[in-house]
Image (cartoon, rainbow, N blue to C red):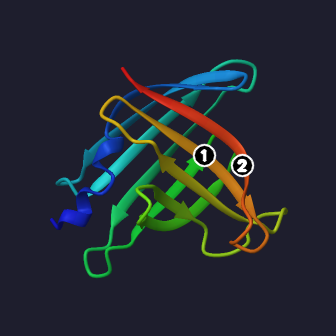
Amino acid sequence: MTAAAHGLDFWIGDWDLTWDGGGGRNTITRELDGHVLIERFVAGGEDAFSGMSVSVEDPSSGIWRQTWVDSAGSYWAFVGGPQRDGTFVFSTAGPVDAEHMVKRMVFSNVSTDSLDWRWEFSPDSVHWQQRWAIKYQRR
């Protein structure tokens, strides 16, 4: 396994999540001989839903791929990886769904016990608007 294959290791673990108006839990594990990260997400409250993702790094290119599915019937395919500014970004390859927007998630302010996560959208992959921000705290 390459060093790049450990690029999401900061995310592995059990997390308590908080955001404006809600909270939940996320559990990320390394599985399938250590090559795949599996995410299990649960949001509580009035807007309760659950989802999961499968993430893997392509060792030949160093590009990460993630597939997300959830209890609302959503399916998303992302590509990405670590960025020079210290963030880790996954985005759709182009505009998706009825909004016809590019979607991305940004992991930032990563420390041993916490991180920030943002869900953003853009019509052109240049001008991004935040839709959702989650604070992760290790359990």
| 128 lies left or right of 92 | right
Q: Quadrant of the N terminus?
A: bottom left
Mark 2: secondary structure = strand
**Which residue is under mark 2?**
130
Instruction: Give the residue displayed 61% in from the left and 44% down from the top.
Output: 70
Q: Residue 66: image x %, image y %?
A: 46, 60
Where is residue 44, by image quadrant?
Answer: top right
| 44 lies left or right of 97 | left
| Residue sitting farthest toward the front | 85
| Residue sitting farthest toward the bottom | 60
Marks 1/2 in contact by CB < 8 Å: the verdict is yes
The amino acid type found where label 1 is placed reads Arg
- The numbered mark, 1 or 2, whose residue comes first in the sequence reads 1
Q: Is residue 127 above or below residue 86?
A: below
Q: Residue 113: image x %, image y %?
A: 34, 28
Mark 1: secondary structure = strand
The amino acid type found where label 2 is placed reads Gln
As measured in the structure, the alpha-carbon distance from the residue carrying label 1 to the one carrying label 2 is 7 Å
Where is residue 83, by image quadrant?
Answer: bottom left
Foreground pick, 70 / 82: 82
Instruction: Give the residue displayed 53% in from the left and 65% down from the top.
Output: 78
Task: Report crowding for label 2: few under 14, some 14 to 19, many 20 or more residues within 10 A (C-alpha).
Answer: few
Task: Report crowding for label 1: few under 14, some 14 to 19, many 20 or more residues within 10 A (C-alpha).
Answer: some
Q: Residue 135: image x %, image y %?
A: 53, 31
Q: Residue 24: image x %, image y %?
A: 56, 24
Foreground pick, 7 / 41: 7
Instruction: Give the residue displayed 68% in from the left and 48% down from the top.
Output: 73
Q: Is residue 50 above or below residue 52?
A: above
**Which residue is under mark 1?**
118
| Residue sitting farthest toward the right | 98
| 126 lies left or right of 78 | right
